[in-house]
Image (cartoon, coloured by chain):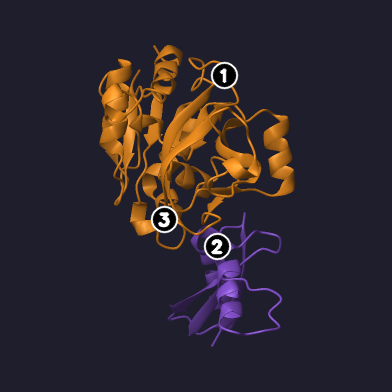
Amino acid sequence: MKAKVHITLKPGVHDPQGRAIGGALSHLGFTGITGVRQGKVIEIDLDETDRKRALEAVDGMCKALLANPVIETYAIELS
Amino acid sequence: MHAAILLFPGTNRERDMARALEVAGAPAPVFVWHRETTLPAGLDLVILPGGFSYGDYLRSGAMAARSPILEAVRRFADQGGMVLGVCNGFQILTEAGLLPGALMRNRDLRFICRCVGLRVERTDTPFTTRYAAGAVLSVPVAHHDGNYTADDDTLARLEGEGRVAFRYCDAAGVVSDATNPNGSRGNIAGIVSENRRVLGMMPHPENLVEPALGGIDGRPLFESLLEALP
């Protein structure tokens, strides 16, 4: 089973990188952008076949290391 | 004063820190590798020096904060032990939850390496007794992720409890957005724990402890430590 962890900044947390990307997109002529937030994706290969157990395991990983709860939230996608 | 300096893969300011202790008149520190699970007995002070532990992978300080020695540091701090984290050391302390908040990418996204103005906000911590209240220092910073952030409640608590030890300012001591090098909330450059025995700060006082380095504004911090831990 493969887990994809999407880590994003919490709403309200200032994101200078996202803002710089937004500025660069505007410079390139893209219009209609009202906001850009940058996050990260972490892919994890698991030998687990049970979805519930896999979800629990990856959730534990997010809490222990992958996301910083002070500034980030996460979403787990299994496939 | 018995001090230990922690070493992680990518730490690079440990010798500067040892030199600062020496200049202040402290006995030579011991160096402790991150895989150790205990700290030497009889320790008064643990120092987490600057550098780029684990190459700043994932988040600055994230991996180091989960290394075995940090559990020992947590126990040490819980028992009232003194801990100093500078730059990457501050990032590790926030990642480990020993200090609140987080250090994010600098506001202008650039690595900043220069001297900044620093105002001493508290002289009632064991790290700052040898400074005059409101003293303005010039101390080097060298970081990419020094933008201190915390939620409104945490920030209000830090301010209310007088736990902001240093703020970025200009040469006259004025704290404003213009004197904020990295976007830190409240121009915060350093904070202490609730019991005031854990200090995390981004600037490098250990790099300004003798005239040959360009000044001695950082030396009183180490002299304060020596006074607190004779």
State the CA–CA distance, disc 2 to disc 1. 35 Å
Q: Residue at x 63, y 30 (%)?
A: B163
Chain letter for mark 1: B
Residue B151, position in %: x, y?
69, 49
Q: Examine the rendered structure and indicate whether residue A35 appears above or below residue B97.
A: below
The residue pinned by badge 3 equals B63
Residue B72, position in %: x, y?
41, 38
Side of B35 where B124 appears, left or right: right
Q: Residue at x 61, y 78 (%)?
A: A26
Q: Earlier in the sequence, mark 1 or mark 3?
A: 3
Q: Residue at x 57, y 26 (%)?
A: B196
**Residue mark closest to the camera, 1 vs 3:** 1
Disc number for residue A67: 2
Q: Amino acid at mark 1?
A: Thr
The residue pinned by badge 1 equals B123
Given residues B62 and A14, the one toward you in this image is A14
The local crowd at label 2, few if under 14, some if 14 to 19, many if 20 or more residues have their Cα within 10 Å, is many
State the CA–CA distance, disc 2 to disc 3. 12 Å
Q: Examine the rendered structure and indicate whether residue B9 appears above or below residue A21.
A: above
**Residue mark closest to the camera, 2 vs 1:** 1
